[in-house]
Image (cartoon, rainbow, N blue to C red):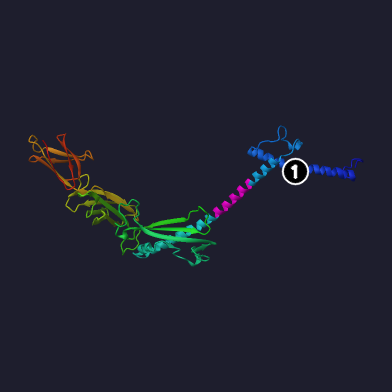
Amino acid sequence: MVPGLDLVGGSMGKELSGQFRGVITKDVRGIVVAFIARVSRVCFGAPNSRGKGSADVLEGERGTSIVEVIVSVVILSIFGIVAMATVSQGAVTSADNRARIGAAGLAQRELDEAGTKIAASAEGASLLIGEGLVANPNPQAGLSVGATGDYGFSMDGQKYRVEREASLYDNHVNSPCTDAALADQSAQGTLVTVTVTWEGMSAGTKPHVASKVFPPHGDASAGSDPTKAQLVVKVEGDTGSGPGPRQGITVNVSSSSGGGGGLSTDASGCVVFVVTPDPGGTEYEVTLGAPGGGQDVWDNGDPAPVKTQVLYPGKSEPVRFLNYSLSGRVSVTVNGTTPEGTMVVLEPMWAAGATAEAEVITGTAVFEHVAPGTYSIWIDGSLVDAVSVAPGGNEVVVLP
C-alpha cells in the first residue's frame, strides 16, 4: 500500500468512506425516481416541469419533482388495479365455462329421459306434456350428492338446477293450422326444452338451454315411430259469405308408393295426413275434390286442383289451397249479327292469358264453373264487355 493513500483507514478514511456511501445512496435513489418519472413521461406524455437542460438527473442539474413521483405512483397503481380485475374476471369466466360443460351433460341426460318416456307408450307424449314445467325431474343417486334446495344435482362440487317442459309441436313454424285444428295428437311432434342453471352464476351469464323435437309417434298401436311424417292441408275460399276456411272439402293424397285415402277438412279448413315417406324423401300429390260435384273451383277454374310436396321422416310440411271457392255461371247473349259457332272468350283480369272459351249456340255462349272474380269478354279478338262473377252467382250479359 502506498503511504498517504489509505482512504479507508484511520479517522479521515472513515469520514471519507461515510461521505462516499452517502453520495452513492442518494444517487441510487435519484436514479430510481428519475427512471419512474421518465417512464411516465415517455409512455403517457407527462409534461417536463423542470425546464431546459434539467432532464439528466445523473448530472445533478436538478432533482425529481414531487409531482412526477405522484404521477408515477398513480400510473403504477392503475396498472395494478387493471391487472387484478383482469385476473379476477378470468377466474369467474373460467368457473362459468367449467360449470357450463356439466350443465350440457345434464341437459342431454334429461332429453334422453324425455325421449324414453315418449317412446314408452302411445300416451307418453301427452303424459309428459301434462306435467308442465318440472324442476329436477329425474334425480340420480350419483348426481345428487351434496345437492340442496333448488339445486337437485351436484357434480365435482358444483350444484345445478334442471328444468324441463314439453309441448305439442307440428314440426313446421309456418304451419297453416293451429294446435286446435290438429285434433289427432298422434300426428304431432313433441318439443322438449331443458334449462340448466348453477349455483354461483356470475351476473350476465346465460343458462344452458337445450331442446329437441321428437317426431310424431303415430297411432296408438304404432307407439313412437320416427319414420312417420305429417302433411297438413289448409283450404280457404269464398262460398258467398266472404273468404274463410272451407269445411267438408275432400282431400286426397297419393305418392308413387300408394294413396293416402280421402279425408275431409274440418271447420278450420284443415286436415292432417300421417304418412311414411322414404328416408330420402317422398313426393306426395295433394288433390282437392269438391263435395258439390265440381261446384267449387280454384282461381284458375280447375275443380280438382293438384299440388305436390316432398316429405321426409319425422317432419311436417304444409300445403295451402287459397281461393278454392263456390263457382258461378256466366251466359253471354250475342246480337243477331254474330254467327252461330262463334267462340266467346272469358279472360280473368287477375291472370292474363288464363282464358276460358264457349261456343255460341242459339245466340248464347254459356260458361259453367267459373271462379269468382272479374273477367273481360272477347269476341273475334275484340274486347266487347266485362263481367264480375260472385261465388255461386248466375251472371247474364247481353251484348248490344
Q: Helix or strand or loop: what does disc 1 sit on?
A: helix
Residue 244 point in image, percent of width and height: 25, 50
Residue 50 as seen in the image, left or right of residue 143: right
Tell which of 57 and 356 is nearer to you.
Answer: 57
Q: Give the extent of the magenta segment.
A: 78-94
> Could you tell me the amino acid type at mark 1?
Arg
Residue 77 as seen in the image, left or right of residue 117: right
In the rendered image, the residue lying farthest to the bottom is 141
Tell which of 267 and 212 is nearer to you.
Answer: 267
The image quadrant of residue 13 is top right
- Which residue does the numbered mark 1 point to in the structure image? 29
Q: Residue at x 51, y 63 (%)?
A: 154
Residue 356 point in image, percent of width and height: 17, 41
Residue 319 showing in the rendered view: yes
Q: Residue at x 86, y 44 (%)?
A: 15
| 333 lies above or below 187 | above
In the rendered image, the residue lying farthest to the right is 3
Figure quadrant of the N terminus: top right
